[in-house]
Amino acid sequence: MSDRCMKIKDTRKENIFSAALQCFIEKGYAESSISMIASRAGISKGGLYHYFPTKRELFLGLFLYRVNQYSEQLRDQLHNEKSPDKRLKMLVREAGSLLVHNEAFYRFCLEFLSIGVRDAEIRSVMTDFYKETVGIFAHIVNEGIDTGLFQPIDSKKLARMLYFTVMGAFFTFFSVDPDFTFSEQFSFQINFMLKALQG
């Protein structure tokens, strides 16, 4: 396939994801139809089925595509920073920036997570995401312990605590009328933990 054809295909897929994202956050998964998404994407229903045979595959595909996209951006940002404490702070700053610039996707994640409560496949996808994220946090914490920057601690438990801190802030931010900005609150929490870690 030529580069031009690949770009057209990628653009169409991105248009489908953007249309699906809007439908899913406005109507919810159950009320969003393939016809509705195709119409918003400016393609035929058959054209959409060419990329995604079912609404479920589109729903899963949207989550995985965007999460991988954002994870890549975060990895690129962290690549050159060697200090574990600075990497954690940078992770917080970049995660907050992603939320501000991609709020629609994060709202979609609430829909995704709520369906995962009853759906084994979505639960499995979220479990993989949880394990990978906790693994990244634990790796950074272990680096800090190995270099003497952090006090010895159970890195897996601390990594889980960091994950729960992120998810707690995330759920609260999108389920209430918040009296805080996500990045500032999360930054405060991480800085507080870092001070405790460094003794």
Image: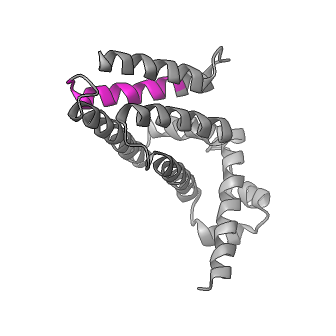
Q: Is 120 drawn above or below residue 3 in the view shown?
A: above
Task: Indicate the quadrant containing the C terminus: top left, top right, bottom left or bottom right.
Answer: top left
Task: Indicate the quadrant containing the N terminus: top left, top right, bottom left or bottom right.
Answer: bottom right
Q: Is residue 162 magenta?
A: yes
Q: Which residue is drawn at 78% across and 56% down?
A: 40
Q: Quadrant of residue 117?
A: top left
- Report the side of 46 relative to 89 (left or right): right
Q: Residue at x 28, y 32 (%)?
A: 144
Q: Which residue is drawn at 72% across and 54% down?
A: 19
Give whichever of 53, 196 is nearer the camera.
196
- Report the side of 23 relative to 85 (left or right): right
Picture coordinates of residue 155, whole percent (x, y): 25, 30
User: What colour scheme governs how the chains and residues are painted in the rendered image of this protein?
Assistant: one colour
Give whichever of 21, 38 is nearer the camera.
21
Dominant secondary structure (helix, strand or loop) of the stretch shown in magenta: helix
Q: Does the magenta stretch include residue 97?
A: no
Q: Which residue is drawn at 35% across and 24% down?
A: 161
Q: Give the range drawn in magenta.
A: 152-169
Residue extending farthest bottom: 1
Picture coordinates of residue 146, whole percent (x, y): 21, 35
The mark total stands at: 0
Picture coordinates of residue 198, whole percent (x, y): 31, 20
Picture coordinates of residue 120, whole percent (x, y): 39, 45
Q: Is 10 drawn above or below residue 82 in the view shown?
A: below
